[in-house]
Amino acid sequence: MIPNTVEDLAGRLDEFDYFSDESLTVAIHIAVQLGRPLFLEGEAGVGKTEVAKVLARMSGSELIRLQCYEGLDVGQALYEWDYARQMMAIRLLEASGKGSEATPEDIMSRDYLIARPLLQAIEASTAGRRPVLLIDELDRADEEFEAFLLELLSDFQVSIPEIGTIKAEEPPIVVLTSNRTREIHDALKRRCVYHWIDYPTPERESAIIQRKVPELEAALADSVSEAMSRLRDVDLFKPPGVAESLDWAESLRLLQAGELSIPVIESTLGVILKYKDDIDLVRSAGVETLVG
């Protein structure tokens, strides 16, 4: 169950190892209690998707995820007809001699519908549950899909011509994320509780590393967080996020590194930087700049 006070919510988020500042906790609280979508923007790897995962675990609800991408259409996100089953049903009717008596309802019922994430969330809510619907990386989808989503999130219902209208009894908990590769339309944002998740301070990032990788020495966690902070000040094509910090910490633990030395950094740059140009840039500037 998700607590109904900000203070209790903050405590529960901490119990689930999610480090949330006060403004994010308040945004989550308002969105959940008012039944409004929570729109999270920020650089990749700062913990936007993790908010939805934590809320699902906290509430004991199902997490339904729609991963957005270029070319995503309504059918892939909402529902599709199971044409293979429909053809099989038609053949069975013909084999039984009832083909001439068949009506469209025989093959256009809910049984022949494949529910995709959006319809799954609506139907789960109709069944008395309140799932967490994660619409991840909305900025990757086309603007046409964004316009459709605007209508759906207003009423949390869908009309299927052959079946009728399916409406959620209680709105699902909706979390939308964007890496801001393009601007999301204002009309959609207005229907949401908005929050920008920034990179954590070195102190907070060190605390996250120590919580997630408890075997790592505190001093080394501090060194990692300071090095990551310096890296984000460099003009990189893809600055590393907290996810990369945790990967780096795990790698250092695996290598039994006692400190963040220049040879260790050189050999593990590929853990935190994923583009050759970024690696070359850091090496040309000198990896010693990452050592405090």
Image: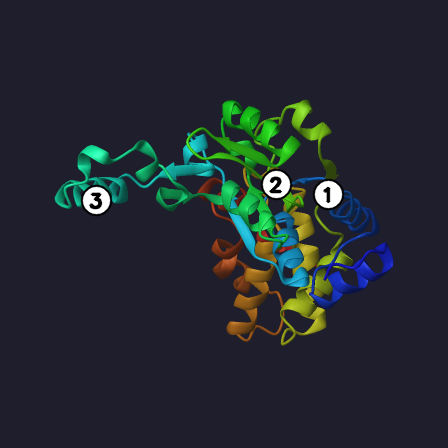
Q: Report the number of numbered marks.
A: 3
Q: Secondary structure at mark 2?
A: strand
Q: Which residue is mark 3?
A: 88
Q: Which residue is mark 1?
A: 35
Q: Nearer the viewer, residue 181 or 5?
A: 5
Q: Is residue 172 above or below residue 105?
A: below
Tell me which residue sits at (61%, 57%) in the image: 245
- In what quadrant of the picture does the C terminus appear? bottom right
Task: Quote the CA–CA distance across marks 3 and 1.
Answer: 41 Å
- In this rendering, which labeled residue sits more in front, label 2 or label 3? 3
Q: Secondary structure at mark 1?
A: loop
- In this rendering, which labeled residue sits more in front, label 2 or label 1? 1
Instruction: Give, as a three-letter code, the residue at label 1.
Output: Gly
Q: Is residue 223 above or below residue 200?
A: below
Instruction: Give, as a three-letter code, the residue at label 3.
Output: Met
Q: Secondary structure at mark 3?
A: helix
